[in-house]
Image (spheres, grey):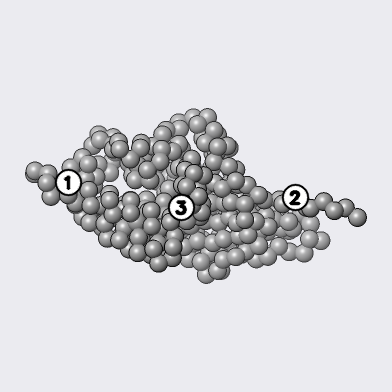
Amino acid sequence: MSTEEPVPAFAPAPGALLLCRAEPEAVAAVAPLLGERMPLVGAGEGWSALVPRGGPWREGGEPVDRVATGWAAALAVCAPWPVLALWWDADRAGYTLASGFRRPVGYVWLADGTPAGEDEAMRTFAARIGLDPVLDVQSLDRLTRPDPDPGQGAAAGAGAGAGAGVDARARLRGLLAVLTRAGITLPAGLAPGEDADHLGTAARALPGVRWTEAAGRRPTADESRLAAWMFWVGGPGARAPALAQTAAGLTLTAWGLRRHSGGWTTAGALLIAHGALGTAHGLTKRP
């Protein structure tokens, strides 16, 4: 009898992708809020993908799911489009959809593909992202079911995310297969489950890739269609979003402190600082 331990099918280094329902130009305008330069590429019709290097979880020891969720929430309250964070580590994988000031919704699978989320969350996700309430929801529901009997073989694997031996990586692929109907198409090389270094290398090799700016550098008025709402270019509508960011930041920070979540607390602190600076700029800038 062999004493060797079975090799896990899904044990990647932590990683994440941020999918934004906007063109790269619009995403580049608000991405400096995250405080980390990232490759930015198109990801289908009306979608863009940010590829994080992952400093908070690689160097700061933060859980990747909390960081990705906090980043998605921070972007979503600063822009009029939703953000879908895909994340994974050695033990789990999942997604979080953030949209405006609504509570983010998400789902989790264990490394072996076992569903560990709530079915209702998947249906809420489908409604918010605009999927078909019948056909697409049926496909998503299959992602919330345990694997069928292994004897069913490859035939069961033809469905989105269903099949014998389906691990968390396959569940995320099944999710993305459904999301093609919402316009998402990840470029070659950007596959869930890969580590951040591999994703970064793949993203840099893609045609049309651009890098987001660091927090200290902001787009100018001529560089973005959102300039009218950016306090650093003195846009006429900047003060109201700055106040909204401050309020959202306070809420996120309080939520993060209560749940001992570094990702939420960091996102809240970023929003507070960003909003406070915008409010101060609006009060001091001459008309």
Q: Amino acid at mark 1?
A: His
Picture quarter with the N terminus: bottom right
Q: Are marks 3 and 2 in contact (CB under 8 Å)?
A: no
Residue indicated by mark 2 = 7
Q: Residue placed at 66% from the left, 58% from the top? A: 113
Q: Are marks 2 and 1 in contact (CB under 8 Å)?
A: no
**First along the sequence among labels 3 and 2:** 2
Looking at this view, is 158 or 230 the one in front? 230
Q: Which mark is residue 102?
A: none
Q: Is residue 105 above or below residue 74?
A: below
Residue 29 figure quarter: top left
Expressed as whole percent of the image width and height from the top left, the position of residue 285 reads 12, 44
Expressed as whole percent of the image width and height from the top left, the position of residue 211 reads 41, 34
Taking the image as shown, residue 264 lies to the left or right of residue 163, namely left
Label tally: 3
Residue indicated by mark 3 = 67
Residue 101 figure quarter: bottom left
Residue indicated by mark 1 = 281
Taking the image as shown, residue 231 lies to the left or right of residue 12, namely left
Expressed as whole percent of the image width and height from the top left, the position of residue 138 reads 59, 64
Q: Is residue 141 above or below residue 5?
A: below
Q: Amino acid at mark 2?
A: Val
Q: Secondary structure at mark 1?
A: helix
Q: Secondary structure at mark 3?
A: helix
Q: Is residue 25 visible?
A: no
Expressed as whole percent of the image width and height from the top left, the position of residue 208 reads 45, 31
Q: Amino acid at mark 3?
A: Val
Q: Residue placed at 13% from the left, 50% from the top? A: 283
Q: Secondary structure at mark 2?
A: loop
Question: Callout 3: few (<14), some (14-19), or many (20+) C-alpha neighbours within 10 Å?
Answer: many
